[in-house]
Image: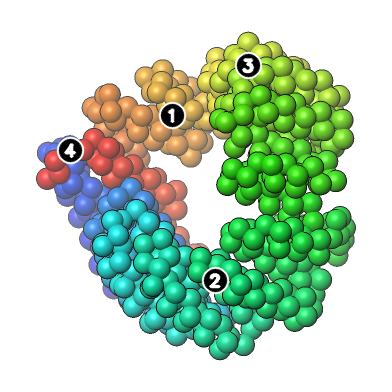
Amino acid sequence: MRKGSFLLLSITILVFVSAAKLQAQISLFSRASLRSLVQETLRYAWELYFAHKDNYGSEDLWAFRQLAIGLSKVGWFDEAVRVLKAMPKPTKTIAQSQYWGAYREVALIAAKTGNSNLAKQLVAQIPNFVGFFKEPTGGMQKSSVVAAIAQNLEKLPPNKARQRLKEAILIANQINDNFWRGNSLSALAKVAVKFSPKEAKALSVQVLAITEKCSSDNQRLNLLISIAPVINHWSTHQAKQIFEQAMQIALMKIQKQDEKNWSIWWVIQGMVEAGLWDEAIKAANLLPEIKPKLRSDIPYCSQILAPLPPTKWEALKAIAEKLAKKKLFTKALQVADAIEEPYERASAYVSIAMFIAKSEPEKARQLLWQSMEIATKEVDLKSNYYLVVTIVEVASKFAPQEASKLAMKAAKPLQRLDSYSASQSLSWLAIGVANVDVQIAQKLFAIAIKSARDITKPDQRMHALENIVGLLCQAKFFNEAQKLLTEIEQASLARGNVSPGRWCLSMRNIIVAMTEAGQAKQALALLPKLSSCYDKDRFDAMLAVAKGLARSDVQTSEKLLLQMLKIARSKWQDYERQKPKLAQLSGIRVYPPHEAFNLTLKITLLVAQVVNQLGRKLQ
């Protein structure tokens, strides 16, 4: 055993002893316990890091990142910074993005929650490094934090906002890469125009100057689109000229057709942001009316990462939605009426209905029925069934008296789909109406369950029933959800060589959903049913219940968490005992129990969250 590992083992054992004594003396929901848990989780993270480095020769900082980011998400920035400082500095280029990415994520969360000073301190430490694929990663990370600071400026009083703006500009100007510096300054200009027009104008001039220095056509295009809406506040003529310049780049400089279409789409988005409606509508005509067919030689995952570019009809729908949001309803309806593709036209009507409902409820009702007529008669509901679900959801908010009628109209064509598609679409439809008509929702769920039972392939039947259970939980029909567990297990076993216990996944989801719905005590009574299930399912359910009980029954919540901590520590001790023996065996890679780290991490973050929620005076 190496010296470092022996030392870490000794320290870890001491942590177990000291932590056990600590828990006997003070509440788990205290600052002292939280610090102890963070320290314990940190030591696990170090062991994972060493093991990965010894076995694979790489620097995996995942464990540190999860702890630091998780702590910042629940408001414990001081503990998150402590983890960042403890994180080992990478020696390899590929690990730099992980390392500084953690700083960026914590800074982002700090900026979004109004802690601009911490965000500024963290981002100042990120160097202008170039990443593994030669991209300016340091500049990109700094730019994203500046953008988050910019969003928070709108919430501040003008004087304070102007002071923070100056600080953010200093950060942005420290970015070496032209594009990311321009991107940051543009984000600040968009906010500054609301409380400091003079500063916004100066920033826009700076961004335009930076644009000329960018060698990439795409980068120049993006900066022009970003800054033009800001310039439109004092010069519509200049803004139009900038959009024309951007469109020329899109049409003349971008060679690949898909990239060209995406570039046109982003120009349209910028025009819409600037309120140049006629220019945006005209530009939409440059897009194709039909999406190109998927190429068979491109892997499926690549198609997801690089989706097909928008069509003319999608652009017009986006324009109609923005017009409606600005309460320009007449113009919005004119644009929507011009959309020839049924799905996009119906979607546009639904969006307009949402915005017009307050001032013209009868018109909103008509638009919802009009969109449902199009959806049920002209749209392929097998691949687009969520359109009718959205119509019903919107109706339940703005025209509840119509929601049930719309749901039953949609149910008829959905029942004619194949059994799997029918079960899924009808379940979602039930969710759409559940808040306003429980009886209709139950009726739709019953039809969906019958459709699921008609599925002949066991694997599909199992997944369909599992999806229905999840949606029943969303509707808070917990008893109905539990009744399907036996059928899920039967379908799972019918697949062939499958070990029993698939129902555990759904049981866990039921317990978690019950807890989130405020039924933590009822969920607690169901925990013993998971005694024979996988650790992950059992622990996820216990964590959820512990969180739910923290407000009403702190002692039981603490008892559950201590029980899980004991299990996690036991797994870690088993590993430490076996490690010397395994290390002596040639060719055996020794790796710590990852599930024990995950469990300790989740408990630590939950304790941090509960302490915040309880609002106790920390010791």
Q: Residue at x 53, y 20 (%)?
A: 476
Using residue 30 as the reference point, say whether residue 410 is left or right of it. Answer: right
Which element is circle 1 on? Answer: helix
User: Rounded to the nearest whole Å, what is the CA distance between mark 4 and mark 2?
Assistant: 54 Å
Picture quadrant of residue 493: top right
Which element is circle 2 on? Answer: loop
Q: Residue at x 66, y 29 (%)?
A: 364
Residue density around tag 1, few if under 14, some if 14–19, many if 20 or more, within 10 Å: some
Foreground pick, 85 / 24? 85
Q: Amino acid at mark 4?
A: Arg
Q: Amino acid at mark 2?
A: Ser
| Residue that label 3 marks | 401
User: Rounded to the nearest whole Å, what is the CA distance between mark 2 and mark 3?
Assistant: 47 Å
Residue density around tag 2, few if under 14, some if 14–19, many if 20 or more, within 10 Å: few
User: Rounded to the nearest whole Å, what is the CA distance between mark 3 and mark 4?
Assistant: 45 Å
| Residue that label 4 marks | 616
Q: Position of residue 128 (x, y in %)?
A: 43, 82
How many numbered marks, from 0 up? 4
Mark closer to the chain start, 3 or 1: 3
| Residue that label 1 marks | 516
| Residue that label 2 marks | 235
Q: Which mark is residue 586?
A: none
Mark closer to the chain start, 3 or 4: 3
Nearer to us of marks 2 and 3 is 2
Q: Position of residue 238 (x, y in %)?
A: 59, 75
Are the residues flagged by discs 2 and 3 in contact, CB closer than 8 Å? no
Q: Position of residue 265 (x, y in %)?
A: 71, 63
Foreground pick, 418 / 86? 418
Nearer to us of marks 2 and 1 is 2
Using residue 262 as the reference point, say whether residue 70 is left or right of it. Answer: left
